[in-house]
Image (cartoon, rainbow, N blue to C red):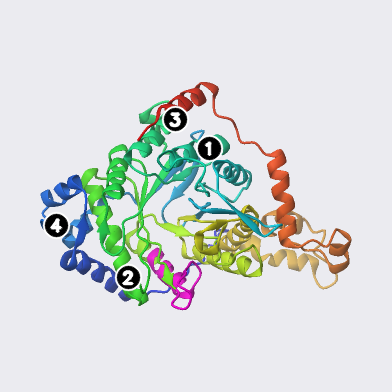
Amino acid sequence: MMTDIALKPNLNFLSNEDKDKIHEAAIRILGEVGMEILHDEALALLKKAGCSVENDGGVKIPGQLVQQAIESAPNNIPVYDRRGKPAMDLGGHRAYFGTGSDLIYALDSKKKQRHQCVLDDVGTAARVADALPNIDFIMSFAHPSDISPERSYLLSFQAMAANSIKPIVCTAECRADLSEMWQIACILRDNENALRAAPYFIHYAEPISPLKHPFSSLDKLLFCAEKSIPVIYSPAPIAGSTAPMTIAGHVAQGMAECFCGLVIHQLKATGAPFIMGMGPAVLDMATGECSYNAPEYLLAYLAAVEMSHYYNLPNWGYAGTSDAQVPDQQASYEAGLLTFLSTMAGSNLNHDVGYLDFGRTGSLEMIIIQDECIDQIRRLYRGIPVSDEMLAVEVIREVGSQGNFLTHPHSLKHLRTTQWRPTLSNRLGFEDWKDSGGTSLLERAQERLKNILLEHHSLPIQQDHAREIQKRVDQFRT
């Protein structure tokens, strides 16, 4: 019996045997080489669980603990928007997309000039993302240079919440400002229990490659476990610098570093939500830059995505980035390729949409261009439904060799659900395109950006909530 459910595309680079070998290598790294743990509570948890703990903070973690942590961590994490409505369902092969965090520069694409990011850039990027239907979550995009470092993350969180209803993925300096972000989320949800039931934000933390887990990263990880805040613990090992040059070795080390965090996290709170991943940077030996778009980066990243499916755990991913300096042809094809690969591989939580310049500069126009790119790729991912209705043999019989399908009810019935329509890309013939202004893709994105900034305003936070949040932010001191 045929149905209208389409087979979903699936992209693979590793065999089952390959995945087994990478897993075994990661377990050997944890159990034979070990990790440096710079946090007393984490060390105590590991020691109590039976790990070998050295006086210098070196810890060897047995494979049994890793397996227990994999089994106890949830394989599906629902995330909700500011209003408490479902927004993302992390896990499986479902792909979601959002901006990135902490960029140093913002680009003026018309003048091809950039300025150091300020707090206003955080709010502006959140408002643009709020207006775009295929941007599912937001990050700060900018790291505000006009705010003291100890307050910058908290004020960025406040600006994101005020300018978008979409879920937030946040960074933080330490447990203190992360705790304030959690307090803000509790205010928006009305209480802690409601926030636990409908998580609004996700925290992003990193260890330091190779094999080092600093106090601040682990302190935030433990706080997230305690409060049931979904947390990403994603190393960023650099091939040829802080990780092996070879792709398989690069991925094995990244998995081991991530799993060290998972074990500690699950020892603190069994079943707390955890998102695995790695940022497999590749050091370009000719320029000294760490490329986001080198083929080796893509291969290592996609291998990490496959490993997340191997473990059936939600993963942290990438999309919409380019090493180009401006939103040009290089930027479009690099960002589009990465977005396509992430979708087809089933990567769950894909960030950095709009990144340029090796992750130093952000472009709002690139976010807008990639919003349409994501939409088209999602149309591809819907696949090809095959059923009697879709095969349309009886319709073909009715039309025969003398008729046409233009006005047939079958065409009208399936037009809008079958054909994807662009809102930014050009589909006009040359003369019509020229008569309509002859604009480039970037010029059309610039015009849409101008309209969003003029016309779009996010749903405001309730006044009593906003006052309570402002009071906490004003009183915050690290």
Q: How far apart are the alpha carbons under marks 2 and 4?
A: 22 Å
Magenta residues span 284-305
Where disc 4 sits, the SS reads loop
Where disc 1 sits, the SS reads helix
Res 153 seen here: yes
Where residue 284 appears, as percent x and y from the top left, is 45, 74
Res 423 seen here: no
Residue ID for mark 1 = 159
At a point 50% along the width and 60% down the height, the residue shown is 359
Where residue 101 appears, as percent x and y from the top left, is 48, 51
Q: How far apart are the alpha carbons under marks 4 and 1?
A: 41 Å
Where disc 3 sits, the SS reads helix
Nearest to the eye among marks 2 and 4: give it: 4
Residue ID for mark 2 = 243
Q: Which one is nearer the viewer's eye here, 384 or 66? A: 66
Residue ID for mark 4 = 56
Where disc 2 sits, the SS reads loop
